[in-house]
Amino acid sequence: MRHLLLCAALLVLAPACSVGGGGGEEEAVVTVGERTISEGEVERALEHFREESEREGREFPEEDAPGFERARDQIVGLLVYRAQIAEGARRLGVQVSDDEVERRAERARKGEGEEAEAEGEEGEEYIRDTVRSQLQYVAAYRKVTDRVVVGDPEIAAYYRKNHARFGDRPLRALRATLAAELLQIKRTRTMNRWVARTQRQFPPRYEEGEE
């Protein structure tokens, strides 16, 4: 399940979850804010990881196997995370166009070559959802961290704290490198706080029997 955990860590990002519900594939699994994740979306994600596992020679649990429910729960958790980021991004005014999603998805398909062709329609839809998620996350990151800056006192303090790494190299020779490094650390922490706050603001509401 390495790829499931990797996707969850990256996170990179929220699919265009359907709103509403019905029977079969459109039956609601969980609701996040104004977004409803359907059984069909869960099935598409399961099929994507199943096909990926087959291509890479790894086993994916059958539906009646002990590990299947754990795999499904991880996938639902990933979709919930993406939906939470999408809701938070929407509040920030982030908009991602279908044209941009399709361009990026086409680029991703070309990069994967024959593997992308083997995905099928459900796999294609999952790729588009993933691309949309990535674009939403990146746009939210830019908005959330836009005003993060570092000043000379912070750089000097960071230099002193990590002096063992730099040996005899003076601060003035390292300033640009340290500023970039510290800025990235502060941006990451700022984004992590935003993600945590967004997850609290949009808790998942699971259908009966799903949680």
Image (cartoon, rainbow, N blue to C red):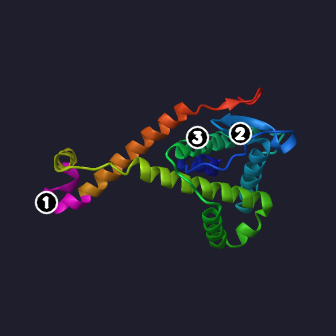
Where is residue 123? Give x, y as percent: 74, 59
Q: Is residue 168 visible?
A: no
The reply to whether the magenta stretch includes residue 166 is: yes
Circle 1 packing at 10 Å, graded few (<14), some (14-19), many (20+), is few
Say the numbered circle drawn on residue 84: 3
Circle 2 packing at 10 Å, graded few (<14), some (14-19), many (20+), is many
Label 3's element? helix
Quadrant of the snapshot with the C terminus = top right
Amino acid type, label 2: Thr
Where is residue 196? Give x, y as percent: 48, 36
Q: Residue at x 56, y 55 (%)?
A: 134
Where is residue 27? Give x, y as percent: 81, 38
Q: Nearer the viewer, residue 38 or 118?
A: 38
201 relative to 58 in the view: left or right: left
Q: Is residue 43 visible?
A: yes
Read off the residue under disc 1: 172
Mark 1 or 3: in front is: 3
Say the numbered circle drawn on residue 36: 2
Magenta stretch? 163-177
Choose the circle earlier in sequence order: 1 or 3: 3
Choose the circle earlier in sequence order: 1 or 2: 2
91 relative to 17 in the view: left or right: left
Circle 3 packing at 10 Å, graded few (<14), some (14-19), many (20+), is many
Q: Nearer the viewer, residue 10 or 50?
A: 10
Q: Residue at x 37, y 48 (%)?
A: 187
Give the CA distance from mark 2 to mark 3: 11 Å
Choose the circle earlier in sequence order: 2 or 3: 2
